[in-house]
């Protein structure tokens, strides 16, 4: 068998037909559509381990630092309060705080 020249190779390539893809290939590449709720029960999302750890840590820190602070304790008065019992200040002694020192 002698080697083919460029014209013969071009002619051979034009006449060549690719074999058909097997039927199972379609199902392997494009699986049947599943409903979204089934995906929520059985699905998975692939992420790198460091990214997953970082997400878990960030969620944990967010929950720890952003939880609502307990409100001030409000005492319920036993008896009704009247302004008649209040007295004016006899002597005012202001305190000056400098540089955060008391």
Image (spheres, grey):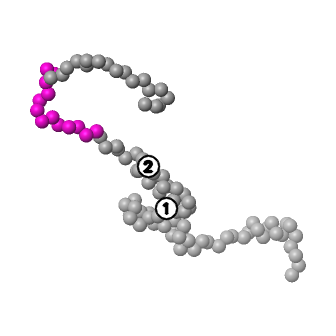
Give, as a single range, the part of the protein colored magenta: 72-84
Q: Quadrant of the N terminus?
A: bottom right
Please tell me how crowded label 2 is: few (under 14), some (14-19), or many (20+) other residues with Cα within 10 Å.
few
Corner quadrant of residue 69: top left
The vertical placement of 30 against 80, above or below, is below
Q: Which of pointers 1 and 2 indicates the residue nearer the eye?
A: 2
What residue is disc 1 on? 45
| x and y percentages locating residue 63 in the rendered image | 40, 50
Question: Which of the pair 40/1 is nearer the observer?
Answer: 40
Residue 46 falls left or right of residue 70: right
| x and y percentages locating residue 58 in the rendered image | 48, 52
Q: Is residue 35 visible?
A: no
The vertical placement of 58 against 93, above or below, is below
Corner quadrant of residue 79: top left
Question: Which of the pair 13/34 is nearer the observer?
Answer: 34
Q: Is residue 78 visible?
A: yes
């Amino acid at each position: 068998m002698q080697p083919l020249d460029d014209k013969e190779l071009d002619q051979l390539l034009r006449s060549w037909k690719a074999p058909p893809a097997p039927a199972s290939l379609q199902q392997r590449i494009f699986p049947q559509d599943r409903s979204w709720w089934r995906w929520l029960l059985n699905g998975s999302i692939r992420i790198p381990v460091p990214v997953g750890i970082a997400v878990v840590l960030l969620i944990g820190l967010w929950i720890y630092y952003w939880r609502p602070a307990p409100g001030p304790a409000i005492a319920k008065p036993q008896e009704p309060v009247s302004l008649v019992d209040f007295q004016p200040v006899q002597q005012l002694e202001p305190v000056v705080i400098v540089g955060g020192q008391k």
